[in-house]
Image (cartoon, rainbow, N blue to C red):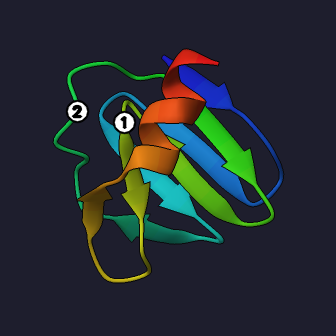
Amino acid sequence: MNYVISTSFQVQGNDVYFKGAQLPPCPAKTKTVTIINDKIYIGGYEWTGTQWKRTLRAFFHMWF
């Protein structure tokens, strides 16, 4: 199944693509996706540019 969220972000199954580059798999089991100003939040994790990191901001975006 293919979900296109925006022109620069795409989810295909368990694969996440951002600006054409594939990101490492997110450790979250939930696939709640929020994108704000090229920052990606998925299931309580934030993409920092090099790795997925669990942050309070990401948790906030997951629930609100």
Mark 2 or mark 1, which is nearer the start of the sequence?
A: 2
Which x, y percent locates residue 57?
51, 48
- Residue 34: image quadrant is top right
Give the residue drawn at x 61%, y 45%. 10
Label ID, residue 28: 2
Which x, y percent locates residue 23?
36, 65
Amino acid type of the residue that numbered disc 1 sits on in the rendered structure: Gly
Which x, y percent locates residue 51?
26, 73
- Is residue 59 shown above or below 49? above
Drawn side of residue 49 relative to residue 61, left or right = left
Amino acid type of the residue that numbered disc 2 sits on in the rendered structure: Ala
The count of marks equals: 2
Are the residues at dot 1 and dot 2 in contact (C-beta closer than 8 Å)?
Answer: yes
Real-space Cα separation, disc 1 to disc 2, in angstroms: 7 Å
Q: Residues within 10 Å of mark 1 (few under 14, many from 20)?
A: many
Drawn side of residue 32 relative to residue 14, left or right = right
Give the residue drawn at x 75%, y 60%. 8
Q: Which quadrant of the rendered structure holds the C terminus?
A: top right
Q: Nearer the viewer, residue 6 or 29?
A: 29
Label ID, residue 44: 1
- Is residue 34 shown above or below 39? above
Give the residue drawn at x 37%, y 30%. 43
Q: Secondary structure at mark 1?
A: loop
Q: Residues within 10 Å of mark 2 (few under 14, many from 20)?
A: few
Disc 1 or disc 2, which is closer to the eye?
A: 1
Give the residue drawn at x 42%, y 64%. 47
Drawn side of residue 20 relative to residue 47, left or right = right
Q: Secondary structure at mark 2?
A: loop
Which x, y percent locates residue 9?
66, 52
